[in-house]
Amino acid sequence: MNGVLGVALQSMQHDMKRVERVGVNMANSLTPGYKREIVVEHPFSNMVADALQTPNASDAKFFQTASLSDPGAVGLDFVTDRQVGTLKPTGEKLDLALASEAYFQVSTAHGLAYTRQGAFRMDARGRLVTAQGDPVMGKSGEIRLNSNVPSIDANGNVYDTAQVNQQTGLPEAAIAQLNIVQFEQPGFLQKNVDGLWVAAEEAGMSEAKNPQVMQAHLENSNVSSMQEMVTLMQAMRHLESMQKVAQGYDEMLGTAIRKLGEVS
């Protein structure tokens, strides 16, 4: 493929990936705890440098700089914006939000996972679980509640409101503590289904020092509709300009071929 048309085609593919990612972000703008994804294009100089490090690299290998999250996105990375979203009060005692960059630990059928979507509930067995029924983990394992209106403090200590100290009027000793963790390298978290994240060993998990749990609150998505619309317009305008480049080059090539035919 001609170099000019190849560059135009690749640019249009990148623009389509941006449009696709904007659609995903907008669809999750009301999903609690959702983190928007940003499309980042690799600088062409970096691609050249990577190719020069491998002298025998083929053209196909030269352009294999795609993110692991989307192998078909040549020359692109998908970066998660981990900025904490705004917190909204819900009045529901089992709704929890984190004002810090930490995660709740969840036990799934495929192993441990992590989430910021704190719309929890109590199942038939008295366990604190996610909306999908996965147990929310505490320091000592699954958390079992005596009622669906516990008191949970900023450090994740769970108190049973039915057991109140008669002298102080406050709940007795905590019956459990949420296992809230943080990561030194959150870039090694991989997005799973239902708002869950799976951590690679390189993520560097540790106990959250200051989790800042907010009971009866949920974290809003950090998607800004206005920002996504700006990104969408930029991508569409760039797509149109690249389309005109490809069309103009094709017309110029056609004219050159006709002129060459007239000369011969």
Image (spheres, rainbow, N blue to C red):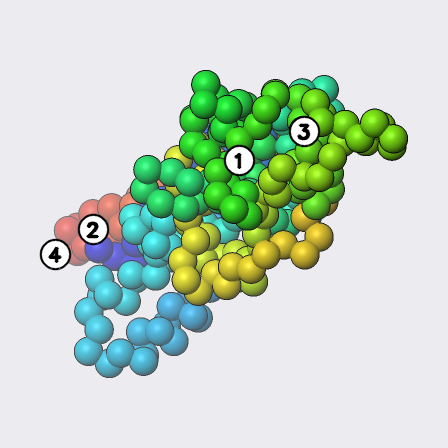
Which residue: 38% across, 68% down? 47
For disc 4, the marked residue is: 264
For disc 3, the marked residue is: 160
Residue 103: image location, x then y, percent: 57, 46
Q: Looking at the image, is mark 3 or mark 2 nearer the viewer?
A: 3
Figure quadrant of residue 99: top right
Q: Looking at the image, is mark 1 or mark 4 nearer the viewer?
A: 1
Task: Tell me which label, 1 or 2, sits earlier in the chain.
Answer: 1
Which residue: 24% across, 81% down? 55
Task: Inspect the image, locate mark 2, and give the three-letter code of the amino acid beneath it.
Answer: Ile
Residue 118: image location, x then y, percent: 58, 32
Mark 2 to mark 4 CA distance (whole Å)? 11 Å
Task: Tell me which label, 1 or 3, sits earlier in the chain.
Answer: 1
Pointer 3 local density, CA inside 10 Å: few below 14, some 14–19, many at least 20:
many
User: Which element carries disc 2, helix, strand or loop?
Assistant: helix
For disc 2, the marked residue is: 257
Mark 1 to mark 4 CA distance (whole Å)? 85 Å
Q: Looking at the image, is mark 4 or mark 3 nearer the viewer?
A: 3
Figure quadrant of residue 46: bottom left
User: Which element carries disc 3, helix, strand or loop?
Assistant: loop
